[in-house]
Amino acid sequence: MIFIRDGSAFLIGETGQETVTVGDVLLLGANVLYGAEPEGHVTVTTIYLDLDYLLDQLFWQHSHILRDRLDAPRFAETIYAEAAQVLRIGEDRLGPLLPALDELVAHSVDGGLHRFHRMQSLWFAIVDQIAPFIRVTPVRQTASQRAHIRPTHPRARRFTPTRPEARSTLEMLRSDIAAPWTLDMLADAVHLSSEQLGRVFLETFGKTPLAYLTMLRVEKMASLLHEGDQTVAVIARQVGWNNRGRASEAFREYTGLTPGQYRTSYRWSTKPAPGPAAHASTLP
């Protein structure tokens, strides 16, 4: 989230070309590359937001319709389909936010952990003014938009362009999570050694390729547990695990529940309360 504080710049990126000036906020998804040429000069403040942090906030914001934390990524992909947006909030609205932005920068520079709750309050004050300007869409629109929503870079990411080998590996994993992928197979496909691919993928997405594959399989298992009555063994095979025990172990490591417990808790949370004013309850 880039705040234009002074001056103006000419932007060139995936959504075309346009000019930003004081009172504009540039909102960029993960791995979205943009170029900017100042028109004379431009002063900005940039806030880098971790995806897991945002998804947690999104879950609690919409907890009346989301059943658990694993529903949040799919919900986010549905309503936030634009890879980049320029929010024209106006100079009058930006002005009162500048002290909060300056204080947030100061805490970030000195580590900030000792003022964690103060940093939280500053962020909430800022986003409260920005959120009404963010455009939402009811459905995903294009393949290129799907490629830029998630996942984001890890918290300790290096701000460098994403390697094409990492992106290609990610696309292979997401296109067929049930395939019997090995690190050597993935490395051969992108013409790197297994050690090189492991390092490149880790630096880009914060997990090794096989750990990322496990995450994708668990998320798909959660979806299938919601949607039908298939056994855990059948669902495990659908996502690529022939061993039910391995699937259950991975699922519990990721969610804190066994597949059976997860299915039971989900169904319990969707039961309507008795009486004429019944409504669906929501559990975290």
Image (cartoon, rainbow, N blue to C red):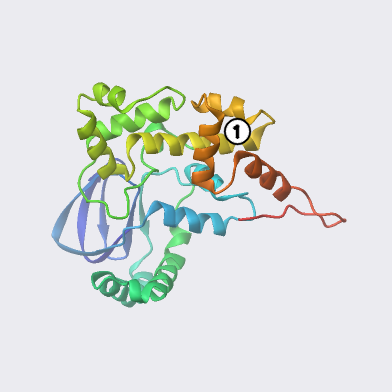
- Quadrant for residue 22, please give it: bottom left
In the picture, which quadrant includes the C terminus?
bottom right
- Nearer the observer, 161 or 266: 266
Residue at x 41% of width, y 26% of height: 175
Residue at x 54% of width, y 24% of height: 237
- Nearer the observer, 249 or 158: 249
**Residue at far front of view:** 245
In the picture, which quadrant includes the N terminus?
bottom left
Neighbor class of circle 1 (other Cα within 10 Å; few <14, some 14-19, many 20+) is: some
Left-right relation of 55 to 170: right
Q: Would you say residue 86 is visible in this rendering?
A: yes
- Nearer the observer, 25 or 245: 245
**Residue at far left of view:** 40
Q: Would you say residue 139 is visible in this rendering?
A: no
Q: Is residue 13 above or below residue 99?
A: above
Whole-percent x, y for residue 235 in the image: 59, 28
Left-right relation of 4 to 215: left
Where is mark 1, residue-wise? 224
Whole-percent x, y for residue 225 in the image: 63, 36
- Nearer the observer, 194 or 50: 194
Count of number-bearing discs:
1
Residue at x 65% of width, y 55% of height: 283
The amino acid marked with disc number 1 is: Leu
Per the image, label 1 sits on a secondary structure element best described as helix
Whole-percent x, y for residue 95 in the image: 33, 74
**Residue at far right of view:** 275
Residue at x 59% of width, y 50% of height: 68
Q: Is residue 100 above or below residue 259?
A: below
Whole-percent x, y for residue 34 in the image: 24, 46
- Quadrant for residue 124, please give it: bottom left
Left-right relation of 15 to 136: left
